Image (tube, helix red, strand yellow):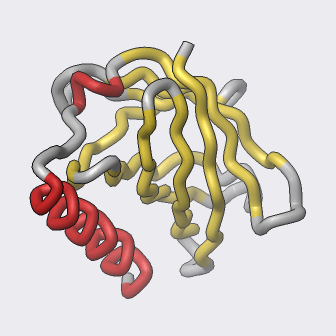
């Protein structure tokens, strides 16, 4: 839970920084289809590819995990260059038979996104990932 709070605080800092600089990202700025991947650690390699559909409003965002289904994405915070999202629970890619809820902070710049996230598995285990995506 502390890590989830940390991600929310990062989004708040991004919002405050953007306000001081006179700008903040809007959901319409990132609307479209994004092809992305999650990586475990710095050298573990890609463990999940995904497709995210973003809309100009918080309703209608989805994330598709090939072979696993499509899941609604909840928008938790927007500010600076960042959007905090959450989706799940969904079947864990790393722990078969378990579910996971993923919370991520994405930093958007034009048609590129980088970010970090953490998945909370129903066992209590937390998995940290980095992410990157390109808009089609």
Report whether residue 132 is seen: yes
Left or right of residue 30, residue 37 in this image: right
Q: Which of the 4 quarters of the picture holds residue 73?
A: top left
Find the residue positioned furthest to the bottom: 2
Q: Which of the 4 quarters of the picture holds residue 55?
A: top left
Q: Nearer the viewer, residue 5 or 69?
A: 5
Q: Position of residue 123 (x, y in %)?
A: 59, 76
Q: Position of residue 11 (x, y in %)?
A: 28, 64
Taking 1 as reference, is 99 above or below it? above
Q: Quadrant of the C terminus?
A: top right
Q: Residue at x 53, y 46 (%)?
A: 90
Q: Residue at x 43, y 48 (%)?
A: 107
Q: Position of residue 54 (x, y in %)?
A: 36, 24
Report whether residue 69 is seen: no
Q: Residue at x 19, y 60 (%)?
A: 15
Left or right of residue 3, residue 133 in this image: right
């Amino acid at each position: 839970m502390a890590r989830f709070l940390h991600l929310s605080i990062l989004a708040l800092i991004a919002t405050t920084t953007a306000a001081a600089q006179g700008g903040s990202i809007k959901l319409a700025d990132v609307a479209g289809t994004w092809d992305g991947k999650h990586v475990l650690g710095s050298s573990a390699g890609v463990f999940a590819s995904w497709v995210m559909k973003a809309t100009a409003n918080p309703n209608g965002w989805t994330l598709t995990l090939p072979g696993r289904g499509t899941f609604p994405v909840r928008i938790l915070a927007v500010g600076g260059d960042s959007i905090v999202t959450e989706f799940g629970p969904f079947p864990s890619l790393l722990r078969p038979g378990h579910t996971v809820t993923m919370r991520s902070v994405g930093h958007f710049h034009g048609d590129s996104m980088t970010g970090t996230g953490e998945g909370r598995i129903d066992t209590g285990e937390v998995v940290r990932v980095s992410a990157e995506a390109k808009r089609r």
